Every structure is written in structure tokens, then in C-alpha cells.
Image (cartoon, grey):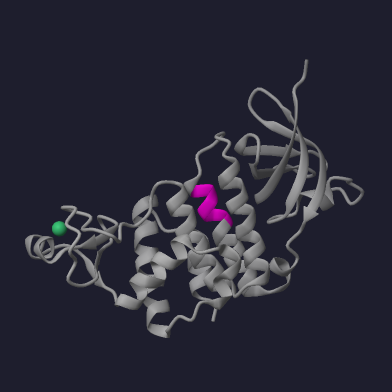
Amino acid sequence: MPEILKTNAIVLRARSYSEADQLLTLYTEKAGKLTAIVKGVKKPKSKLRGGVQVFSHTNVDLFLGKNLATVTQAETINTFAPLREDLLRMGCGAYLAELIDSLVPEGESDTKLFSLVLMGFYLLSVEEPRLATKVMEIRLLRELGYQPQLESCVNCGQTKLAGYYFSSELGGLLCVQCLRDKPGMAIVKISGETCVILKQLMSMELTKINRLRISANAKRELAEILDLHITNCLGKKLKSKDFLDNLA
Ligand SMILES: [Zn+2]
């Protein structure tokens, strides 16, 4: 019996496969991240065309083959249209999609993570996109076990911290003693405000991020340490990040 899986999915990436076919990277609710082929989708009359746009939330039927899944039905639930209409939102969307693709392992379903990812694309379409991107970076890191350590020294566990010295290499704050013991280590000194905002972004209700007031300095520091931390976690810089950084 051929196995058809009906599931909600988010289209993270679409690339050309042959003259008429496309390969999609989908993050699905029931089967996690997977690659699927959509046959004939580039033909003008394809019924699947509308349902498989990048960044969209869609309801798909997947035929699970031995090596590759095939999309046999696709019905859009939300295209998150603003992500296609505004260059900054589009850049943030491409970055979020690449970040998810890089952080999430293949084939592991996680309903909670799926809801978070879905929420991320929704926030990007309605909120200030750079802030929405920051909160999603932090939440994805937390959900996937890469949360930066802010409550105690990441090296020795000491909870008394006399300043905010972030080690990008270790992924958290250092106490003064460890700071002295590791003179060669790359450290970013952040303000108390940045540390508070980071903690807030980690736990606050996602629909309330527009209430946050963040100084230009804290925004800069937040971006700096998250970029360093993510690059360290992934061991590489994401391609879409350069594009995003070059947008005004
Ligand atoms: Zn320490």
C-alpha cells in the first residue's frame, strides 16, 4: 500500500529540479523536515502551483517514496503575503527559513517546534521584521538546546556576575574570575539593558513583542552576540544573512 501523509507544512525552500519539477524543503507538522518533489509545478496550468509558494503555510498530501516524498496535493492556508511584498520582510523570511533549515534535523517531528516556526512567519508578516527575526533566533535556539547562558557563568557556574561579558565561543556570560583566567578569549561586553531584553525575548508572549522599547545600543549588542552565537552553533555563516545585513 502506498503511504500518503496528510500534514500541515511550511515551505522553507524551493529549487528547480528539472524543466517542470521543483524540489521543496518542507517543515511538516507530522514528519518534521523533509525534501519533496512537486512534479509539473512549473507548468502554467499546474494545480499545485498556488499551494507551494516559499514561506507559505500549506496543507499537503505527501506520497512517501523510498528516497523522496512527492507532493500530490497542496492547499494554501496562509501565504504570508507581506513577506513577498516588502524587501526587508522577504530578506528576514529567507534568513529565518535558512536558519530553521540549518538548525532542525531531518525527519524529526515536533509539534511545539512546528507551532513556533509557524508563529515566526506570522510575526515576520505583521511585526517590525528585524525584531521578529531576533525573537525567533532566540526562541529557536532555546527550543533546540542552544540557548545562550545568562543566569550564571557559562564556564564555572558561578551565579554572582559582576558585569555582562559574553563569550561567543562558550555561548554565555562569564564571571570576572573566568574572564581573568582566559585572557585570549573573544569577549563582547554587553549592557545590563541588553541582558534584560535577551531574557525577556526568551520568555515573553510572542504576540506582545511590539510593546518592547529597546535602545539603539541594545539592538546593536543583541544583533552582535546573536550573530556570533549562531555562527558558533552552526559552524558557518548563513548565506541569507549577508543579504539581510546589506539591506538598509
Ligand atoms: Zn566563571
Report the residue at 17% width, 71% height from top.
162
Q: Does residue 189 appear to the left or right of 241 in the view shown?
A: left
**Left or right side of 152 for 200:** right
Question: In this view, which residue lies farthest toward the bottom?
Answer: 216
Residue 142 is left or right of residue 183, and the answer is right
Q: Residue 65 is drawn in which quadrant? A: top right
Tell me the quadrant of ligand 1. bottom left
| Position above or below: 145 against 181 | above
Q: Which residue is drawn at 60% across and 59% down?
A: 120
When asked about the image quadrant of residue 180, the answer is bottom left
Residue found 51% across the figure and 54% down from its top: 99
Residue 160 inside the magenta-drawn segment: no
Q: Give the range drawn in magenta.
A: 97-102
Residue 88: image location, x then y, percent = 61, 74
Q: In this view, does 125 lie above or below 113?
A: below
* Rendered view: 64 above or below 163: above
Is 101 one of the magenta-colored residues?
A: yes
In this orientation, does residue 13 appear? no
The picture places residue 79, in percent across and down from the top left corner, at 76, 59
Q: Nearer the viewer, residue 141 or 184?
A: 141
Prevalent SS, magenta region: helix
Q: Position of residue 126 (x, y in %)?
A: 67, 70
Q: Give me the residue at 39% from left, 57% from top.
A: 230
